[in-house]
């Protein structure tokens, strides 16, 4: 944006409001235009101040953060970034994302120490990215019915991979539940989430899907009918054991910006599955997935990217497209149909 991003900070703690304001205003790209103590105040402040982005806690008296997000999205969508503590509110965070929040930052548990400032860079980058999100994407996405299998698959691919970041929890709800129970490929997903969220998110996606969705465990067999979500904090790679392929989880490599990494996932798939790899890179900040897409393409596989018009943040798909590695740019509501047509 040509002017500073105007931000409203919502938290019932005066200390946290002060700290978040200081973290955001360290960067000249952001201006905190107001604060609110709870969801009710926040609704009024959004209407009065018209901020570009709202940064909100979830656990507050009266109208809590989740209810605030639901009500605000119904009145007028605005980009919202959640700041919350994982151990105490992972289900609330997922509910907030379901309701339309763009992203979240995990608060340090030791709020009264300098550790709270450790998340400053992450918070600033997510707020700036949120300011550019298309308002039409900021809405609650309901369960999507599974698509029918119109014909027997041709057997072109052996695996479907999905990489996603900012906007991913909502985006995946528009793709995975539409895959039919008879979908012939195993599905493996890397989504950038802090530790403490992926298992709960997998359960929510499983409840909405015909396929079985689980957080991956080391040694899980890669087989049709199951969607594996890489656990936060560990990379997922593939290893052949006789006639089967299994998932391996490891903190290494340590030099990646994200763990799990889409690049690590796609490179491993390219090495194991070769030209029978179908990869999809969806909404997200940064360029995770570009190097992996190059591996997939080099081995003869196919890479699809989410189209810019439906991305919450057009970063990861853009990096793949600009590198000349995308075989098709597909809007979110058409991704599942495109996947099924390709197989």
Image (tube, rainbow, N blue to C red):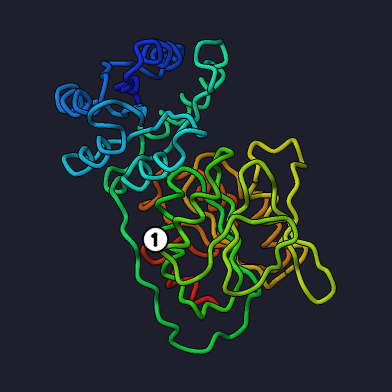
User: How many numbered circles are shown?
Assistant: 1
Q: Position of residue 287 (x, y in %)?
A: 58, 43
- Residue at image point 31% right, 33% down: 65
> Circle 1 sits on which residue?
174
Q: Is residue 22 left or right of residue 273?
A: left
Q: Is residue 101 left or right of residue 287?
A: left
- Residue at image point 40% right, 51% down: 170
**Residue 44, placed above or below residue 136:** above
Q: Residue 298 is drawn in which quadrant?
A: bottom right
**Residue 223, placed above or below residue 148:** above
Q: Position of residue 51 (x, y in %)?
A: 25, 25
The quadrant of the rendering that contains the N terminus is top left
Q: Is residue 331 left or right of residue 155?
A: left
The quadrant of the rendering that contains the C terminus is bottom right
Q: Secondary structure at mark 1?
A: loop
Of the pair 114 and 203, the residue shown nearer to us: 203
Q: Is residue 260 left or right of residue 181?
A: right
Q: Position of residue 7 (x, y in %)?
A: 31, 22
**Residue 242, placed above or below residue 172:** below
Q: Position of residue 163 (x, y in %)?
A: 56, 53
Of the pair 158 and 107, the residue shown nearer to us: 107
Q: Is residue 160 visible?
A: yes
Q: Residue 161 is drawn in which quadrant?
A: bottom right
- Residue at image point 65% right, 45% down: 260
Badge 1: how crowded within 10 Å, few (<14), some, or many (20+)? many
Q: Is residue 7 visible?
A: no
Of the pair 298 and 38, the residue shown nearer to us: 38
Q: Which residue in the rendered view is the most extreme toward the right? A: 242
Q: Which residue in the rendered view is the most extreme toward the bottom? A: 152
């Amino acid at each position: 944006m040509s002017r500073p991003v105007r931000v409203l900070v919502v938290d019932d703690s005066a200390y946290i409001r002060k700290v978040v304001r200081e973290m955001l205003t360290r960067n000249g790209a952001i201006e905190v235009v107001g604060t609110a103590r709870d969801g009710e105040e926040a609704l009024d402040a959004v209407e009065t101040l018209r901020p570009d982005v709202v940064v909100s806690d979830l656990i507050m008296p009266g109208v809590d953060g989740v209810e605030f997000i639901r009500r605000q999205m119904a009145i007028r969508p605005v980009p919202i970034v959640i700041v919350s503590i994982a151990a105490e509110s992972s289900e609330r965070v997922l509910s907030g994302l379901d309701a339309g929040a763009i992203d979240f930052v995990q608060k340090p548990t030791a709020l009264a120490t300098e550790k709270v400032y450790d998340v400053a860079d992450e918070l600033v980058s997510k707020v700036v990215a949120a300011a550019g999100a298309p308002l039409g994407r900021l809405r609650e996405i309901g369960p999507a019915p599974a698509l029918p299998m119109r014909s027997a698959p041709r057997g072109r691919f052996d695996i479907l991979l999905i990489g996603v970041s900012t906007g991913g929890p909502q985006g995946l709800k528009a793709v995975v539940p539409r895959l039919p129970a008879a979908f012939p490929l195993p599905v493996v997903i890397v989504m950038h989430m802090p530790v403490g969220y992926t298992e709960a998110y997998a359960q929510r996606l499983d409840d909405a899907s015909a396929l079985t969705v689980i957080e991956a465990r080391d040694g899980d067999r890669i087989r049709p009918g199951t969607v594996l979500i890489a656990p936060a904090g560990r990379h997922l790679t593939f290893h052949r054991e006789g006639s089967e392929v299994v998932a391996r989880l490891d903190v290494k490599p340590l030099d990646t910006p994200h763990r799990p990494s889409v690049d690590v996932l796609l490179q491993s798939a390219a090495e194991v599955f070769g030209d029978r790899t179908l990869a999809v890179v969806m909404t997200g900040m940064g360029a995770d997935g570009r190097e992996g897409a190059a591996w997939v393409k080099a081995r003869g596989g196919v890479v699809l990217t989410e189209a810019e018009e439906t991305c919450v943040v057009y970063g990861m798909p853009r990096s793949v497209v600009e590198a000349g590695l995308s075989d098709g740019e597909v809007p979110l509501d058409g991704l599942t149909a495109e996947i099924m047509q390709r197989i």
